[in-house]
């Protein structure tokens, strides 16, 4: 635990100073020590959480928050192919941001899902309920990943579930984003099949859902 705390602190310093090389070196050391991308993701998630909290109290600027996200996405994009695997008979997975326009979380989840060998279709962001449902039908999606940033958007997911039921769509629904981290029961209230706390959790949920009877 102490070592991980030190790695998070080193990564935090690297991101805040916009040191791309130093930040990537920290994550590669994590990967080399533990041979797992889930540990890399945990360091990223916890560090970005600290930066977000720092911005809320005025310690960090909005540009630092934004650039930290950009740097993380760049590093993840370079590292993930090293962990890539190929799956046979992969379910079709769709991912999109409902209404909101904050796409960093979606991009990280998409990259991790791809690295695990799943077939995934990116529907984009700022989508309406109808657009999300129509794309799910058009691509014959087996598992739909829906991300939201704001609570009103999260509550709209209930309308996706209602349309699925009305049209006889059996697509499994996994939700994620800030509102679901603040309220652990919200995913059930909106009719989702599961709550993906982070990208690694999403992988575990997908594997469970697609093998469930």
Image (spheres, helix red, strand yellow):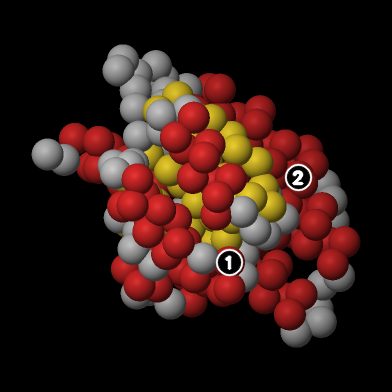
Q: What residue is pinned by disc 2?
A: 71
Q: What residue is pinned by disc 1?
A: 153
Query: Is there any visible trace of residue 104 in the rendered image?
Result: no
**Secondary structure state at the residue bearing disc 1:** helix
**Secondary structure state at the residue bearing disc 2:** helix
Q: Position of residue 115 (x, y in %)?
A: 49, 28
Residue at the spot x=65%, y=58% of the render? Answer: 99
The answer to which image quadrant residue 78 occupies is top right
146 relative to 57, above or below: above
Q: Position of residue 1 (x, y in %)?
A: 43, 62
Are the residues flagged by discs 1 and 2 in contact, CB closer than 8 Å? no
| 53 with respect to 38 (left or right) | right
* Front in this rendered view, residue 18 or 98: 98
Tell me the quadrant of the picture where the C terminus can be found.
top left
Q: Which mark is first along the chain, 2 or 1?
A: 2
| 61 with respect to 173 (left or right) | right
| 203 with respect to 125 (left or right) | left
| 173 with respect to 122 (left or right) | left
Q: Position of residue 76 (x, y in %)?
A: 63, 37
Spatial distance from mark 1 to mark 2, Cα to Cα? 27 Å
Q: Position of residue 189 (x, y in %)?
A: 35, 72
* Front in this rendered view, residue 136 or 148: 136
* Front in this rendered view, residue 31 or 111: 111
């Amino acid at each position: 635990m102490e070592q991980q705390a030190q790695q998070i602190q080193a990564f935090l310093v690297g991101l805040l100073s916009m040191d791309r090389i130093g930040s990537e070196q920290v994550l590669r050391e994590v990967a080399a020590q533990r041979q797992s991308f889930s540990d890399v993701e945990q360091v990223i998630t916890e560090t970005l959480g600290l930066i977000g909290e720092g911005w809320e109290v005025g310690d960090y600027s909005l540009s630092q928050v934004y650039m930290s996200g950009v740097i993380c996405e760049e590093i993840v994009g370079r590292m993930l192919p090293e962990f890539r695997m190929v799956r046979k008979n992969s379910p079709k997975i769709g991912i999109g941001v409902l209404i909101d326009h904050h796409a960093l979380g979606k991009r990280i989840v998409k990259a991790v899902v791809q690295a695990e060998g799943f077939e995934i279709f990116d529907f984009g962001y700022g989508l309406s309920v109808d657009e999300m449902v129509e794309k799910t039908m058009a691509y014959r999606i087996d598992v739909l990943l829906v991300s939201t940033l704001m609570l009103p958007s999260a509550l709209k997911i209930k309308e996706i579930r209602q349309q699925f039921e009305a049209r006889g769509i059996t697509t499994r629904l996994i939700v994620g984003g800030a509102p679901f981290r603040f309220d652990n029961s919200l995913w059930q209230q909106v009719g989702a099949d599961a709550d993906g706390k982070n990208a690694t959790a999403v992988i575990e949920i997908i594997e469970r859902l697609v093998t469930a009877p």
